[in-house]
Amino acid sequence: MNVLIVEDEKGLALEMDEFLSREGYIVEHAWKKSSAEEKIFVNNYDFILLDLGLPDGDGFEVLKQLKNLKDRDDAVIILTARSAVDDRIKGLDSGADDYLAKPFSLNELLARMHAIIRRKHKLEKNEVKIHDFVLDIQNHTVSFQNERVPLTKKEYEIFNYLVLNKNRVVSRISLTEHVWGDILEVNSDSNFVDVHVKNLRKKLTQCTKTDWFETVRSIGYRINY
């Protein structure tokens, strides 16, 4: 999943970057309100970690711009030193999914992100059963009959995103954006997505039939269950 960190305190931003990258997230930065709005306009993100006190404006304006865009479901966690209850209420009422006061534990941040994923996708825990497979979104593994399937990092991320969007057609563009990050940096004419999906399907099929893993011609992919 891809994350946009909107934070002008570079030490904290880099610390979050390093931590979340180790956890398998694709991380981008915006140090100012203006650059955050530019990135949000171009790309979709699974999470936006939003500081309120930006050097060229208020983070609430970034949140407002996001909510004015159509068909967006980016999860927003506000990260701020502001402790006033009114600010917390304003953030949540404006559409933020959670609010974390500085200083905070990175492990708590990750736990809140996992909680948002569970709520968003109506999961009871961090494991998702897909036919005879189990996807562990916390440990980034896929297993079949208690045996781990040897997926690469990108194969896991593709499977994870398709599973969390079960029964929906996921376009190649959307898959590219959420797995590789900034879509402007990717050659949209390349077939690298299809190659990764082909390898993923091959490994799953070595375990059992995968007729529920569907290719939707000229559009993308869908996992049905």
Image (spheres, helix red, strand yellow):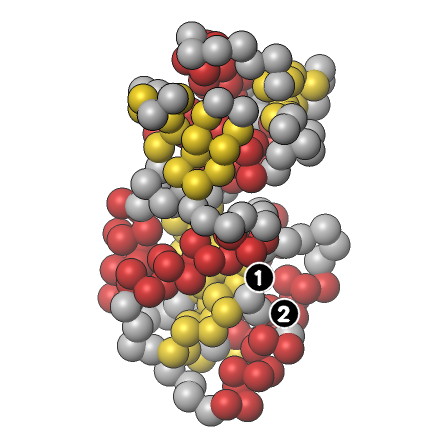
Residue 79, above or below 140: below
Q: Nearer the viewer, residue 218 or 88?
A: 88
Q: Residue at x 72, y 51 (%)?
A: 71
Q: Establish if 9 lies above or below 120.
A: below
The front one of 61 and 48 is 48
Compared across the picture, whether 90 is left or right of 202 comes to: right
Q: Position of residue 186 (x, y in %)?
A: 50, 31
Residue on which the image places disc 2:
95
**Residue lying farthest to the front in this orientation:** 145
Residue 37, labelled with which disc? 1
Q: Looking at the image, is 148 positioned above or below residue 60?
A: above
CA–CA distance in space, label 1 to label 2:
16 Å
- For image coordinates 46% across by 25% down, the residue present is 133
Q: Who is closer to the viewer here, 38 or 205?
A: 205
Q: Which quadrant does the C terminus fall into?
A: top right
Amino acid found under the numbered disc labelled 2: Gly
Of tags 1 and 2, the one toward the viewer is: 2
Could you say whether the residue bearing mark 2 is in a helix, strand or loop?
loop
Label 1: how many Cα within 10 Å (few below 14, some 14–19, many 20+)? some
Residue displayed at 64% across by 75% down: 94
Circles 1, 2 touching at the beta carbon (< 8 Å): no
**Relative side of 221 to 140, left or right:** right
Specify the quadrant of the image occupied by residue 221. Answer: top right
Q: Position of residue 32 (x, y in %)?
A: 46, 68
Q: Amino acid at mark 1?
A: Glu
Whether residue 114 can be seen here: yes
Q: In the image, is residue 136 above or below residue 5?
A: above
At x 62%, y 19%, the residue is 212
Rendered image: mark on residue 188? none
1 or 2: tag closer to the N-terminus:
1
